[in-house]
Amino acid sequence: MPMGKENVRILISQEDLERRVAEMAEEINRDFAGRSADDDSLVCIGVLKGSAFFLVDLLKKLTFPVKVDFFQTASYGSGTVAGEVRIRKDVDLPIRGKDVLLIEDIVDTGHTIRTVLGLLRFRGAKSVRLCALLDKVERREVDVPIDYCGFPIEDLFVVGYGLDYDERYRNLPYIGVLEMD
Ligand code: IMP
Ligand code: MG
């Protein structure tokens, strides 16, 4: 679909995303089954902005109570220390003693998630599980354990379903690969 100078080739269709997100929610529901309705110690934390679309679709399918919060991160640009991640927006909710489900759109080098995981542990989270829609395995520079992974993908630059190229394409209902011409 032409949406600018570039073409977007569909990599993961809307139907495949919906099916996989439903499967992931089922898996999470199974793992967290047995939590009582008044147990509000689970905090779901999304990393803005990319994970917002995935987080909303996933959380609507969870069958136990959760709280929702967000981090926003930024990587330093070229010319600075590689892998240094800045926290632009911190979470508002207290983390000490909480079970955290961290929700990310894509794990690429791993630096963003490693920084966020470190911060959550430092704050005294009781447990942290990572749920990532996409995993660019080949690009990994630091090891991060993904508990729930939607799709492993090749080393391609992808957009849509929250992911952007220069703030564009986030609202595509599928994941696509940008093809410049
Ligand atoms: P990291 O390299 O694992 O720290 O990933 C940092 C961030 O880069 C991710 O959270 C995404 O926001 C962004 N990113 C990585 N790969 C892509 C991509 O293919 N398309 C769009 N954003 C990406
Ligand atoms: Mg992101």
Image: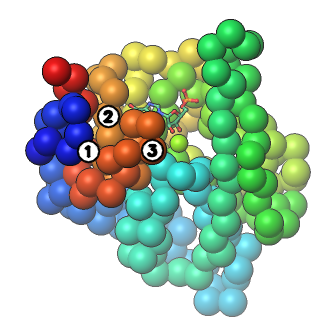
Write down the residue under mark 3. 167
Write down the residue under mark 2. 158
Q: Earlier in the sequence, mark 3 or mark 2?
A: 2
Vertical order, 119 against 16 (above or below):
above
Residue located farthest toward the bottom when viewing the structure as drawn:
38
Report the amino acid beneath label 1.
Answer: Ile
Report the amino acid beneath label 2.
Answer: Val
Question: Splitting the image into 4 quarters, where does residue 127 fall?
Answer: bottom right
Position of residue 11 measured from the top left corner of the image (x, y, whole percent): 18, 38
Vertical order, 99 against 128 (above or below):
below
Question: Splitting the image into 4 quarters, where does residue 144 fall?
Answer: top right
Give the distance between the C-alpha atoms of the residues marked 3 and 1, in whole angstroms.
15 Å
* Direction from residue 97 to residue 71 in the image, left or right: left
**Structural crowding at the residue carrying mark 3, measured as other residues with C-alpha within 10 Å and reported as few (<14), some (14–19) or many (≥20):** few
Badge 2 residue CB within 8 Å of ligand 1: yes
Q: Tell me if label 3 and label 1 are in contact, CB under 8 Å.
A: no
Vertical order, 106 against 36 (above or below):
above
Q: Nearer the viewer, mark 3 or mark 2?
A: 3
